[in-house]
Amino acid sequence: MNERQKHYSEIFSTFVKLSREKEFLLDRIESLLPECRESYLDVGPGDGVLMSSVARFFGRTVAIESNHAFIPRLEGLADEVVSGRIEEVEARGQFDMILGSHMLGYVAPSDRCQIVRRLFGHLKPKGILILIYNSVNSDVYRILLALSAYSGKCWAKPVVFRKPGDILGAASGYITLKRDRMPILTNEEKAATDVAEFIAFGDRPLNEEGRRVLQKLVDGYRREDGWWQIMIEHEFLCLSPSRNVLKSCPFLAKQVDFTNC
Ligand SMILES: C[S@@+](CC[C@H](N)C(=O)[O-])C[C@H]1O[C@@H](n2cnc3c(N)ncnc32)[C@H](O)[C@@H]1O
């Protein structure tokens, strides 16, 4: 484990502890659970808080995680843990549900399509692949844009799947998109700063000027009671080989037919 991975895991755990994000996510995920619940694969589960809540519904859980700092904890939560980057390791078997929550943003854009295709190939016929990521409508996105000038690397590009064509035939049928508003609340100034920084750069530290800008930005989200409220809009991309599975999604916002892509 290197220092960057350790730093990342600490910031992430602070974020999870001080926000209600995972509660909201779980609520949505529960409404998408497949009928058959033998096996569940979580890609990039982080500290496993969300994964373990979902795992309760399944007979067997497999985790693939690239940050070594999370591995010991994950080993206590999943039946099998594969340590490595999803680009380089392969999950064995077929799954009823595969979840990738807030992880595709850390993968190079040129690799994303292929990863989605591969994961899709690990679904059982009535399985569901759920990808969750932050929408460009989120406050976080505005913070990212403002900060990108100080990172030397712009993470604030339009999100992965804005265009259905990005995944072409991977869905072999339908794509489901749902937007959902939810707040992140933190009660420590440092945590609020870390949250934005973590989301913005993962393991990249900001320079002095970047920090100043970040502080000013998060100050804008301070509430009367001393808490911070940053709005995140999540997008859920649900893929399944079965049209019926997608049709039964409770918040099916729109269907896009991929057959001509
Ligand atoms: C923002 S965290 C999300 C954690 C969890 N899915 C959740 O929503 O609470 C992203 C996680 O994805 C992991 N990750 C990033 N890139 C990855 C990759 N290429 N392969 C596997 N895991 C990856 C990171 O190490 C981190 O634990």
Image (cartoon, rainbow, N blue to C red):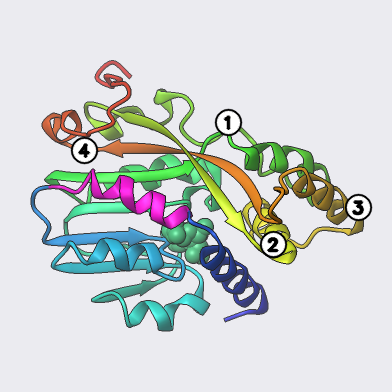
Q: Nearer the viewer, mark 2 or mark 3?
A: 2
Chain part drawn in magenta: 21-34
> In the picture, residue 117 is in which quadrant?
top left
Q: Nearer the viewer, mark 4 or mark 1?
A: 1
In this view, which residue lies farthest toward the right?
Answer: 209
- The answer to whether residue 203 is left or right of residue 185 is right
Q: Is residue 246 above or below residue 63?
A: above
- Residue 137 colored in magenta in the image: no
| Residue behind mark 3 | 209
- In the rendered structure, find residue 240 and report the number of the disc placed on it: 4
Q: Which tag, 2 or 4, sits closer to the chain's start? A: 2
Task: Tell me the kind of residue under disc 3.
Answer: Glu
Secondary structure that dominates the magenta span: helix
Q: Which tag, 4 or 1, sits closer to the chain's start? A: 1
SS category of the residue bearing label 2: helix
Q: Which tag, 1 or 3, sits closer to the chain's start? A: 1
Task: Tell me the kind of residue under disc 2.
Answer: Asp
Q: Nearer the viewer, mark 1 or mark 3?
A: 1
Q: Who is closer to the viewer here, 143 or 186? A: 186
In this view, which residue lies farthest toward the front?
Answer: 225
Q: From mark 1 to mark 2, how far is it between C-alphas?
A: 21 Å
